[in-house]
Amino acid sequence: MTLRISIAVVFCTFLGFSAFSQKGYELGGWIGPTVYFGDLNPDYDVTHPGAGGGLIFKKIYNERIALKFGANYLFVKGDDLYYDNSFQQSRGLNFHSNVWELGSELEFNFFAFNPMSRDHFFTPYLSAGIGLFKFDPKATYDGVTKKLRPLGTEGQNIGEEYMTTKFMGIISGGLKYALNSRWILSLNISTRILTTDYLDDVSTTYPDMVVLESLREDPLAPLFSDPTENSYPGKQRGNSVNKDNYNYIGIGVTYFIGSLQCPDISK
């Protein structure tokens, strides 16, 4: 048995620790720009970003697989006046929203990754998962900022407004690099597949403004529904076919808590 153990130790050392099983945890965070795509940014413009950041916790199963949990805050925004096409200029809508989210992703490393190895300190990776997000769109017109959902800007009846806490899908990818045996630097690009088209409060058609004013106690509801007064009941306000989404590019730093374990040697 002593001979088998000696051979195993020499074998693991010869492979630069690649035969070891990496297990443990990573703790850290990220910051970076965010961008929203939807009715107020239909051309996927990235020149008007918001910002975000979050906390990262990973359970490391081996050099290829990890389970990631995240708690994030993101600020997203859009404005028709950023763009010069006639439809958006005549519509004149804007929004901004804080987004809070919790998510879990299964992460796969393309190369074996081990911060304690001189040979496996870098890898591209992909991850996917699900999560919950909460949003609350607001807009500003004539120097006044209001929450949009309570105004029923597309003629929603009271009590039938869209939900602001929803499920989402998560797809991410990036690169990770071990600065040393404990600290890991990562670049992460992530997109959210949303189950709502009301992140920006824009989805279907304009309501009858007389009816809207009678439904809502706030006299500014018609202004926030149609700030340019170019609409009529049933006129297109948004495109409900494609759901909104938001994305971010994050620079992350995590700290590895764990050790390397040589595979069990049979007796």
Image: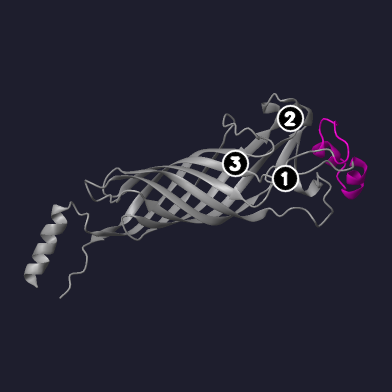
Question: Mark 2 or mark 3: which comes first in sequence?
Answer: 3
State the separation of the CA atoms marked 1 and 3.
23 Å
Dot 3 lies on which element? strand
Dot 2 lies on which element? helix
Residue 223 seen by the camera? yes
> Please, is residue 22 above or below residue 81 in the view?
below
User: What residue type is disc 2 on?
Assistant: Gln
Which label sits in the foreground, 1 or 2? 1
Q: Which residue lies furthest to the bottom in this view?
A: 267
Within-10-Å neighbours for mark 3: few <14, some 14–19, many 20+ = many
Q: Is residue 240 or residue 224 the one in the foreground?
A: 240
Question: Which residue is under mark 3?
Answer: 75
State the separation of the CA atoms marked 2 and 3.
22 Å
Q: Is residue 127 or residue 135 the one in the foreground?
A: 127
Q: What stretch is highlighted in magenta?
A: 209-234
Question: Which residue is under mark 1?
Answer: 240
